[in-house]
Image (cartoon, helix red, strand yellow):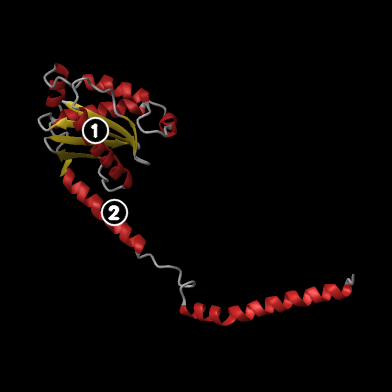
Amino acid sequence: MVKLTIVGRVSDGLPLAQGPRYLNEDIENMSFYKQQGEIILQEISKGALPLPKMCIRIDHHCFSYLVENGICCITLCELSYPRKLAFHYLQDLQREIQMVDSKLIQMINKPYSFIKIDNVIGRVRKQYVDTRSQANLSRLNAHPRYIQDVVTEDISTILENKRKSEILERALLSTRPVSTIWCSPLLVTIALKWTPITLLLVVATVLFWANFFSQTNPV
């Protein structure tokens, strides 16, 4: 069954909504899967996962995501749940969200604060709980090649790529060259040579003008 849903904004990876919680949920496990779903959203936002739809295996579950018009819908289902239904669910969510004013979506600045989408998730999810309902059987029988082009990856591969990317980024930052002007040995030599002379000239100038003003303005 559909266990978790996250709707996020691709431009900055902000999770907008996650749908209602259910009394029979394993809170500890759901918190872990939610964290993994947020990582997937961030990787999509950074361009590390450029495909518009994909399946990502994790334990005995599978994340499926669908990106359309700057919105990413992610859902977590058991491996036994039909993948085709998972993507039909995501498509239905996308259709509902596209009817929401895009300006409202862009105004959201706090994670999981778009309650209107929470309610949409809860309503659409109910249609996909029973995989043997007539509507879901019809979805399964229609368009047999619907998900043949969906790439499947393991979460461990994505996390490893994320780790390598972060290491590379830190390495590039640590080796970024300092401006050659300020670290130039020639500049250091010039500074050591001319700084004392410059200081003497400044002191002499101050003393000259102090003596000048004292002579032109006697007490």
Residue 87 appears in view: no
Return the residue nearer the eye: 156 or 218: 218
Position of the N terminus by quadrant: top left
Between the C-alphas of marks 1 and 2, the distance is: 24 Å
Give the amino acid at mark 2: Glu
Residue 30 pos. (x, y %): 21, 31
Q: Residues within 10 Å of mark 1 (few under 14, many from 20)?
A: few
Residue 8 pos. (x, y %): 32, 35
Q: Residue at x 24, y 55 (%)?
A: 164
Mark 1 or 2, nearer chain start:
1
Q: Quadrant of residue 5?
A: top left
Return the residue nearer the eye: 189 or 83: 189
Relative to 90, residue 216 above or below: below
Residue 2 appears in view: yes
Residue 19 pos. (x, y %): 29, 25
Residue at the left extreme, as displayed: 80
The residue indicated by pointer 1 is 31
* Left or right: 18 as drawn, with respect to 160: right
* Left or right: 27 as drawn, with respect to 209: left
Give the amino acid at mark 1: Ser
State the SS at label 1: helix
Q: Residue at x 56, y 82 (%)?
A: 193
Residue at the top extreme, as displayed: 134
* Left or right: 180 as drawn, with respect to 34: right
Position of the C terminus by quadrant: bottom right
Q: How many marks?
A: 2
Residue 203 pos. (x, y %): 69, 76
Q: Residue at x 64, y 77 (%)?
A: 199
Residue 166 - label: 2
